[in-house]
Image (cartoon, rainbow, N blue to C red):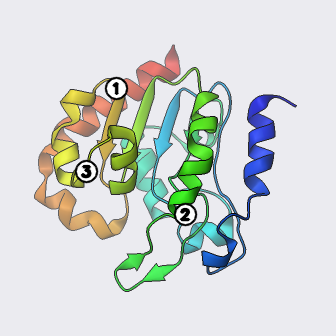
């Protein structure tokens, strides 16, 4: 068993935040030692918790469209690592899902990222991933606007949820410019 497999086994046995979760812990992530692209999101939602597959919903369909990849490519751990800031569904609050529990990233993020030596692009989704990966507190809108600073190693995206349709309509430059560059970069990485 290699280091990545050992870490995944440890993550799947994790119960650090069990008392704070609405369901028994069910860490959901995807990682392979040869992954070229990292998707750093927030935490699994309720549907993902029950399915056990990240982005297997309308958000995932939109994200794959943004990336210009199909499901086979997306779910290949040697192409894409999917490491949310929290691996378990944190539950609901009145504004939507609760934030990811910080102990998850504090415990697992560095050891897992250390295994990803082939990464060429990190896709950052959501304010908690922005804060961790960019080491600054920015709104999603500001972080997306700053994408040229992070390119070509990192890119910030709004969450691909249908809940963000209004944001997408208010920011047509995102589809016109950001997504064009993103698809080109992803194809360049996957074909090399």
- Residue 107 relative to residue 162: left or right: right
Which residue is pictured at 63% across the width and 50% down the height? Answer: 29
Q: Where is residue 155 in the image (x, y as percent from the top left)?
A: 32, 36
Which of the two labelled residues, at mark 3 and mark 2, occupies the earlier sequence position? 2
Q: Position of residue 133 (x, y in %)?
A: 39, 40
Circle 3 packing at 10 Å, graded few (<14), some (14-19), many (20+), is few
In the rendered structure, find residue 137 and report the number of the disc placed on it. 3
Q: Which of 17 and 69 is in front in this view?
A: 17
Q: Can residue 159 be seen in this view?
A: no
Q: Mark 1–mark 3 contact, CB under 8 Å?
A: no
**Image-quadrant location for residue 50:** bottom right
Q: Nearer the viewer, residue 165 or 54?
A: 54
Q: What element carries label 2?
A: loop
In the rendered structure, find residue 184 and report the number of the disc placed on it. 1
Q: Is mark 3 on a helix, strand or loop?
A: loop
Q: Mark 1–mark 2 contact, CB under 8 Å?
A: no
Separation of disc 3 and disc 2 at Cα?
Answer: 22 Å
Separation of disc 1 and disc 3 at Cα?
Answer: 28 Å
Which of the two labelled residues, at mark 1 and mark 2, occupies the earlier sequence position? 2
Quadrant, the N terminus: top right
67 in relation to 33, above or below: below
Q: Where is residue 148 in the image (x, y as percent from the top left)?
A: 19, 29
């Amino acid at each position: 068993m290699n280091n990545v497999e050992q870490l995944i086994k440890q993550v799947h046995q994790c119960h650090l935040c069990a008392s704070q979760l609405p369901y028994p812990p069910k860490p959901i992530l995807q990682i392979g030692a040869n992954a070229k692209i990292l998707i750093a999101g927030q935490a699994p939602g309720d549907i993902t918790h029950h399915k056990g597959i990240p982005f297997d919903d309308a958000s995932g369909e939109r994200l794959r469209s943004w990336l210009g990849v199909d499901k086979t490519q997306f779910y290949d751990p040697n192409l894409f690592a999917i490491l949310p800031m929290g691996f378990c569904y944190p539950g609901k609050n009145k504004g939507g899902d609760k934030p990811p529990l910080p102990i998850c990233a504090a415990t697992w993020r560095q050891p897992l990222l250390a295994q990803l030596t082939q990464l060429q692009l990190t896709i950052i989704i959501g304010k908690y991933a922005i804060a961790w990966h960019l080491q600054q507190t920015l709104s999603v809108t500001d972080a997306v606007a700053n994408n040229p600073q992070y390119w070509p190693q990192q890119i910030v995206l709004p969450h691909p949820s249908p809940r963000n349709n209004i944001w997408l309509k208010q920011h047509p430059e995102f589809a016109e410019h950001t997504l064009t560059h993103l698809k080109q970069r992803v194809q360049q990485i996957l074909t090399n």
